[in-house]
Image (cartoon, rainbow, N blue to C red):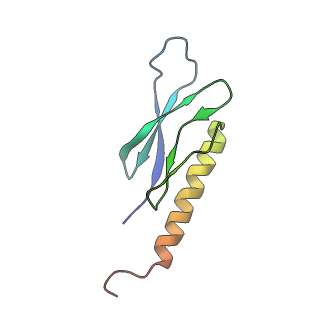
Amino acid sequence: MTFRIMLQSKPSPHFAETHKRWQVMLNGEPWGDLFYYNMRGFVGVLPLPDGRSFDPGEVTLTQLRREVAQINREAREAAASTPAAGA
């Protein structure tokens, strides 16, 4: 089973909001609520391969992208180290 997180920008629903919101995409499907900016950083949760959610706290967009890359890397490594079913 694949596990891949991506971020997709969404326009803000509010006129005065200057930062875009970001939709978490899990295997190409929208997952959870949008990440939004709250004056100190983006806030939201990311999915983990074991089904739990991870709250990175108030982070910059760069830090958020690093977290996504790290989770994707760990999921790939875990999938590669797990023997295939029926083998």
Nearer to the camera, 57 or 87: 57
Residue 11 vertical position relative to residue 73 in the rendered view, above or below: above
What residue occupies the far right of the structure in this picture? Answer: 40
- Residue 57 position in % (x across, y down): 63, 40
Q: Is residue 5 left or right of residue 16?
A: left
- Residue 71 position in % (x across, y down): 55, 57
Q: Is residue 34 left or right of residue 16?
A: left
Residue 45 vertical position relative to residue 76 in the rendered view, above or below: above
- Residue 74 position in % (x across, y down): 56, 64
Quadrant containing the C terminus is bottom left
Q: Quadrant of residue 41?
A: top right
Q: At 49% across and 56% down in the image, what residue appears? A: 48
Quadrant containing the N terminus is bottom left
- Residue 68 position in % (x across, y down): 56, 50
Q: At 61% across and 25% down in the image, what residue appears? A: 38
What residue occupies the far top of the structure in this picture? Answer: 15
Q: At 33% across and 81% down in the image, what residue appears? A: 85
Total marks placed = 0
Residue 56 vertical position relative to residue 48 in the rendered view, above or below: above
What residue occupies the far front of the structure in this picture? Answer: 52
What residue occupies the far bottom of the structure in this picture? Answer: 87
Q: At 59% across and 27% down in the image, what residue appears? A: 37
Q: Is residue 40 left or right of residue 23?
A: right
Residue 38 vertical position relative to residue 69 in the rendered view, above or below: above
